[in-house]
Image (cartoon, grey):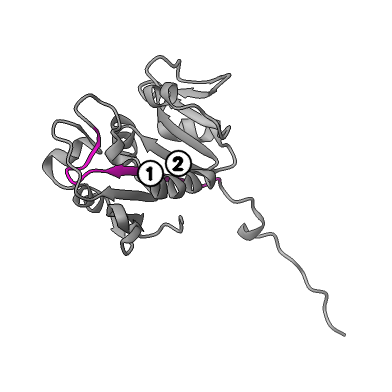
Amino acid sequence: MSLPTVTSSSSSSRPEAPRWTIEGFAIVSDDDRIADAHGTMPDALRNEADRRVFQAGLDRMNAVLLGRTSHEVTPNRSGRLRIVVSARAHGIERRGDGWWWSPQIAGIPEMLATVLPEGGAIGVPGGRSVFDIFLAYGYDAFHLTRAKGVALPGGTPLFSDCASGKAEAVLARHGLVSDPETILDPDWSITQTVWRRAHSGAA
């Protein structure tokens, strides 16, 4: 006579803790600039092939986090959930156009747990101050596109740390490793390299 199988409750039956992934997206010039000396994105950094890849990347995200200025000048035509970084926010607050967040009042873990309590992927398209915040926190992946042959003297760097090294060196110092370079537009020398945290499964 066989004994009945006893199923014990183990840690495998416990609900998994929420997990969040952070992915950055940027196109830069040869001198690691995301904007020109006037603080605007020039036509030299605008490319249709990059735009398609960029939009497809954001479509995979559960939320998109960007600075207040970028939010105000970029219409949310796709209706994505936005998290707006602003000192004008009272911690973390829900407004009609998305979540508003002040990192000076509420930390990143609190923001993530409030906006996406079940976990998810957050896309970070900038600008520099926002890129800096998550560079310190830790990206799971950073999609770095380069417009080769373009220089923007006096422009806005991708990271504040770019003053002491190329963007690739900055990402490497923060624990990311690069995938092989991909050519997005051979006619305009637009290439992309995805940098990933070694343990990350982010695509």
Of residues 85 and 150, the one nearer the viewer is 150
Q: Quadrant of residue 202?
A: bottom left
Query: Could you tell me which secondary element the residue under label 2 belongs to?
Result: strand
The residues colored magenta run 18-35
Q: In this view, does 191 lie above or below 138?
A: below
Residue at 69 percent across and 59 percent down: it is 9
**Which percent across, then down, holds residue 136?**
29, 39
**Residue that badge 2 annotates:** 123
Label 1 amino acid? Gly
**Residue that badge 1 annotates:** 24
Residue 19 falls within the magenta-colored stretch: yes
Residue at 20 percent across and 35 percent down: it is 160
Question: Is residue 61 found left or right of 35 in the rendered image?
Answer: right
Question: Is residue 178 found left or right of 149 in the rendered image?
Answer: right
Question: Is residue 169 found left or right of 127 in the rendered image?
Answer: left
Neighbor class of circle 1 (other Cα within 10 Å; few <14, some 14-19, many 20+) is many
Mark 2 touching mark 1, by CB under 8 A?
yes
How many marks the image carries: the answer is: 2
Residue at 45 percent across and 25 percent down: it is 84
Of residues 106 and 184, the one nearer the viewer is 184
**Which percent across, then down, holds residue 46?**
34, 40
Label 2 amino acid? Gly
